[in-house]
Each structure stands twice: as C-alpha cells, then as structure tokens.
Amino acid sequence: DVKVTQSSRYLVKRTGEKVFLECVQDMDHENMFWYRQDPGLGLRLIYFSYDVKMKEKGDIPEGYSVSREKKERFSLILESASTNQTSMYLCASSLGRKNTEAFFGQGTRLTVV
Amino acid sequence: AQKVTQAQTEISVVEKEDVTLDCVYETRDTTYYLFWYKQPPSGELVFLIRRNSFDEQNEISGRYSWNFQKSTSSFNFTITASQVVDSAVYFCAPSPFNDYKLSFGAGTTVTVRA
C-alpha cells in the first residue's frame, strides 16, 4: 500500500513563527502536492513538485514556500505564520504519469494563534 | 476558466437508501479526467474512481456506479444500498488532459443513519 506520512497531526503555532510541515512518501512517486482544506472551499493546491528540486505554484502559493531535496520528502514552509493560515494541510503523491490518482496523507491541522 | 461545482452541500439518508452525488465541471476542454474521493471522519482522502470525458459508458463496481453526461459535463456518482460506513465527505476532482494536477470541488457531506 502507498503510504504518505505527515509528521504532525496537530500543530499550534504563534503568529510570525516560521513553520515547517513535513511529508514523506514510501512508493517512489515522482509527484508530490500540498493542499489546504477549508470548509466550503474543498481542497486548494498550494504547491506541486514533479521532481527533486522542482516546484510549481498552485492556486494559492502566497505566504508559502516548499522544499524538495529528496524524492520521498516534500516540505511546506510558512515563512511567517498568520492567523488566516489556520487550516487543514494535506500532502499527496502520485506517479509521474499524467492524469493518475493521487494518494493522500492523514492531514495536519494547523492552528495559528 | 475551469470550474467544478458540487451543488449538494449535505445529504442525509437512512441505511439501504441509494445516494446520488452530482458534480459539474465547466471547461472548454473536450478531453479531461474526473476523480472521486471519499474523506471519512478519520480525515484521510481515499481514491474511489477515475473516469475520462471521452467514455460515456456507465459503469458499476460493487455498490458504486457512475454516469457521465457529456452535453452537460455532469458526472453523477451513486452509492446503492447505503451503509453507515459510507458516511463521509465526497469530492469530485477534475484533471485537465495531460496534466498532473487535480482540482477539487467543495465536497458533499453524506450522512447515513442506521
């Protein structure tokens, strides 16, 4: 089974802190994604990576950056956390083929106070 | 611009009733894929099915069935004889042809009561 693991299930951070969300997948997938999920809005793509050190902005990249130094690990970085970044963050991975299904982690619920 | 709409916010049924979920994908593209995901209370999204826009044949897999109406870009997903374990949020997620990315609708919350 594909396993996508996010390092934390729940996080509470203070406004202005630099926050790292980590994601690891064990199926040698080329593609990795970060989404945020908010009620009534579904999932929105923040960033996407199709290879090591490669990244592409999604629909809502402002206030976020990402890092992919190794194929299995994709990190989401909040440079200076703000209260409007309180949300559920979901990591996903997929094979390098186009139009293929993505597999999701269990999510990290981040609260910024 | 492309837009995915799941007009139903919540559906509540009694066990063994059928549940049909609607999804409309507005796009100028004629070729695309559409995925359905389920998110149970535990939170992890589970992949259910992938369909493409150039195959209008309806399909059935166990208690799940789906049909696509090309004229209205409408994908309907039906759970037959619903069970309490089907209670979850269901998302449709279109993907443009030859793309890696998925967009997601707002989701439909299905509650199945015993």
Image (cartoon, coloured by chain):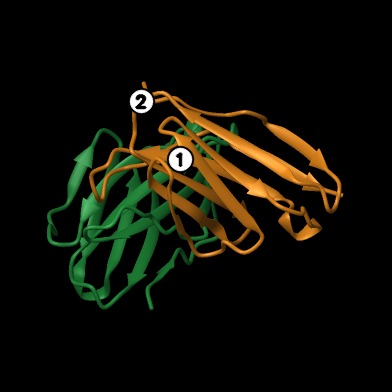
Q: Look at label 1 and name its amino acid.
A: Ala
Residue A111 shown left or right of residue A37 in the figure:
right
Point out residue A67 in the picture as x, y percentages from the top left corner: 53, 43
What hue represents chain A?
Answer: orange
Mark 1 sits on what residue?
A: A92
The one of B74 and A57 positioned closer to us in this rendering: A57
Residues A67 and A6: in front is A67
Near-viewer residue (A38 or B79) = A38
Mark 1 crowdedness (10 Å alpha carbons): few <14, some 14-19, many ≥20: many
Which chain is green in the picture? B
Q: Residue at x 75, y 60 (%)?
A: A84
**Residue A40 pos. (x, y %):** 61, 61
Q: Examine the image and state in which quarter residue A22 appears.
A: top right
Q: Which residue is mark 2?
A: A27
- Residue B52, image x and y in percent? 20, 56
Q: Which mark is residue A107?
A: none
- In front: B88, or A56? A56
Q: Which residue is at a point 34% across and 33% down the rendered structure image?
A: A29
- Residue at 32% of width from left, 42% of height from top? A101
Image position of A66 with respect to A29: above or below: below
